[in-house]
Image: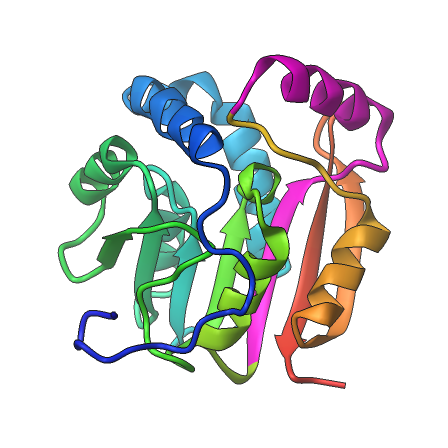
């Protein structure tokens, strides 16, 4: 059920994910919430900057940040585009608590997972997701949900680690062995294929480095476009 009491269409994929993986995410980010912005400041600034540089909007859309964490990207968006109607979701209450202290009260924040978004069909003009995709245990379900809540022709900008880079492959392998919160990183080709399966078109993906070693990708796509 969504907030209006009406049922929303489901993605058709699994929406739950592995409960132990979810518990690990909640525990890790509960413990990190008060120091996350300081500890990962370079990484946050670099990835948010790369996302904003590829976010082509007029500035009056309704936008959802999937995995908004402490709200830093939403804060930058609100400052750059004051007319944007903003919302964010994150599964970790402690991260959302930090976001609520940072953001204006009119910015809607909800505790939710990417695989089960608490919004009506075709609610948003734009979705962004930054540094989240490698945690999602059912990525296609999450992309189907992104498509469901986007309006036809809506924009989706996704930034995450890129498995095409050797350092990401090595780090991803280590984390899969020793960190239950981490799930999987993807190659550019895999990301493109999943976006297409979820109904996105006009897919453009760039891979790039934000440091000498660390590589990311940002995908820009549109719901239903050909």
> Does residue 108 appear left or right of residue 64 in this picture?
left
Residue 56 visible in image? no
Could you say where residue 19 lies in the image, as x and y percent from the top left?
43, 35
Q: Is residue 152 above or below residue 221?
A: below
Could you say where residue 5 lies in the image, as x and y percent from the top left?
17, 76
Residue 39 visible in image? yes
Q: Residue at x 67, y 35 (%)?
A: 184
Could you say where residue 40 lies in the image, as x and y percent from the top left?
48, 22
Question: Which residue ends up furthest to the left in the rendered image?
Answer: 105
Residue 84 is covered by the magenta coloring: no
Could you say where residue 223 lies in the image, as x and y percent from the top left?
61, 79
Residue 175 is covered by the magenta coloring: yes
Choose top left, top right, bottom left or bottom right for residue 204: bottom right
- The residue segment tinted magenta is 154-180
> Does residue 219 appear left or right of residue 152 in this picture?
right
Q: Is residue 26 above or below residue 126?
A: above
Q: Residue at x 65, y 70 (%)?
A: 198
Choose top left, top right, bottom left or bottom right for residue 81: bottom left
Q: Is residue 117 above or below residue 166?
A: below
Q: Which part of the image, by quadrant, shows the C terminus? A: bottom right
Nearest to the observer: residue 102 or residue 152:
152
Q: Residue at x 34, y 52 (%)?
A: 89
Nearest to the observer: residue 136 or residue 34:
136
């Amino acid at each position: 059920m969504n907030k209006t009491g009406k049922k929303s269409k489901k993605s058709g994929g699994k929406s739950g994910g592995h409960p132990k993986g979810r518990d690990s995410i909640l525990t890790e980010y509960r413990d990190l919430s008060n120091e996350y912005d300081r500890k990962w400041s370079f990484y946050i600034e670099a990835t948010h900057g790369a996302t904003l540089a590829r976010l082509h909007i007029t500035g009056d859309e309704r936008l959802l940040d999937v995995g908004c964490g402490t709200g830093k990207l939403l804060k930058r968006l609100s400052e750059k585009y004051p007319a944007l109607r903003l919302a964010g979701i994150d599964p970790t209450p402690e991260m959302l608590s930090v976001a609520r202290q940072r953001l204006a009260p009119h910015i809607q924040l909800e505790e939710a997972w990417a695989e089960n978004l608490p919004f009506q069909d075709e609610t948003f003009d734009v979705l962004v997701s930054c540094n989240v995709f490698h945690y999602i245990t059912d990525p296609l379900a999450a992309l189907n949900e992104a498509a469901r809540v986007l309006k036809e022709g809506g924009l989706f900008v996704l930034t995450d680690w890129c498995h095409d880079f050797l350092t990401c492959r090595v780090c991803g392998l280590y984390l899969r062995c020793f960190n239950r919160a981490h799930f999987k990183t993807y190659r550019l080709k895999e990301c493109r294929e999943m976006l297409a399966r979820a109904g996105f078109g006009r897919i453009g993906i760039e891979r790039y480095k934000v440091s000498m070693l660390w590589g990311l990708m940002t995908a820009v796509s549109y719901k239903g476009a050909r």
